[in-house]
Amino acid sequence: MAGILYLCPTPIGNLGDISERVIETLKEADLIAAEDTRNSMKLMNAFDIHVPMTSYHEYNKTQKAYTLIDKLKEGTNIALITDAGTPGISDPGEVLVKMCHEEGIGVTSLPGPCACIVALTLSGLSTRRFCFEGFLPADKKEKEEVIEDLKREYRTIVLYEAPHHLKATLEELRRNLGGERKIAVCRELTKKFEEVSRLTLEEAVSFYDKNEPRGEYVLVIEGIDRKAEKEEQKKNWEELSFEEHMKIYTDRGIDRKEAMKSVAKDRGISKSDVYKALLEK
């Protein structure tokens, strides 16, 4: 029988956050695939785990996945860990999981630490709906496309960022999303000096102009205020005459009846009000 791939979350700062189930799974695995075996050895020593390890990281994620798949097919049970947090979240583990499903190999994920969720719940911003972008792309054009999408995002936004990129990222977000947008800048999560700064993007840029970033960051940013945006859009529409507003839709080939419906919706009035206003002209 084929082995099973176990996704084992590891602490993001506080060793006490590892679960008994994860420790037991790591001890019983035949092989542990780790993002950085030297870093993970500290965790293994702390919990008296003596299982062979192999490296599985961003730079060998595809080639090494084939090797791990072969071992799983032979019946090897493999525990996958990342340097910190849940494997597969902004992590090459997603490649291995996808290949396991394609090959019909069993995968199970154990609950545990995840910086994204910790930061979101600490942020004081809406947690009902959120989008997770992980690290912004390194490619300039791709990054611009992602940020363009975020400008129109209604949900709370969660990003990861390294200290040496933080200032540039905050400035880029301020420029595109607006300085008044609220942000929770989270660092040292679960550690002794955990810090959550609730600011506007303008205030965050100003703060880090004077203070050097230290540690890994999670940025939690409020989405667009849908109600305020609708009010602003309505105000913009009302600056047009009814004829000008209608022309926007009829120029697209939309018939007058449907155009009146769209104008009424834009302005928050009834279709009969639009019809009456047009007749009066």
Image (cartoon, helix red, strand yellow):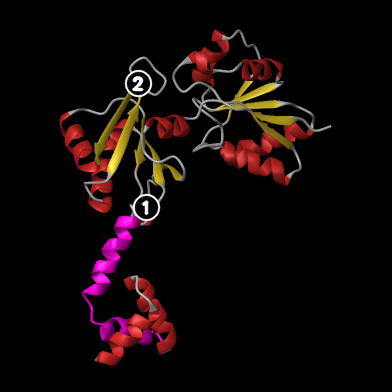
* Part of the protein shown in magenta: 227-253
Q: Which residue is painted at 29% across and 56% down in the image?
A: 228
Write down the residue under mark 2. Answer: 194
Membership of 196 in magenta stretch? no
Drawn side of residue 99 relative to residue 250, left or right: right
Amino acid carrying mark 2 in the image: Glu
- Return the residue nearer the eye: 100 or 132: 132
Membership of 231 in magenta stretch? yes
Drawn side of residue 36 relative to residue 241, left or right: right
Residue 66 in view, yes or no: yes
Mark 1 neighbour density, 10 Å: few (under 14) some (14–19) many (20 or more)? many
Amino acid carrying mark 1 in the image: Leu
Q: Quadrant of residue 48?
A: top right
Q: Quadrant of residue 67?
A: top right
Q: CA distance from mark 1 to mark 2?
A: 27 Å
Q: In the rendered image, which quarter contains the C terminus?
A: bottom left
Q: Is residue 269 above or below residue 168?
A: below
Q: Earlier in the sequence, mark 1 or mark 2?
A: 1
Q: Which residue is painted at 15% across and 30% down in the image?
A: 210
**Dot 2 lies on which element?**
loop
Q: Main secondary structure of the magenta part?
A: helix
Q: Position of residue 52 (x, y in %)?
A: 65, 18
Write down the residue under mark 1. Answer: 150
Circle 1/circle 2 CB separation < 8 Å: no
Q: In the rendered image, which quarter contains the N terminus?
A: top right
- Return the residue nearer the eye: 59 or 50: 50
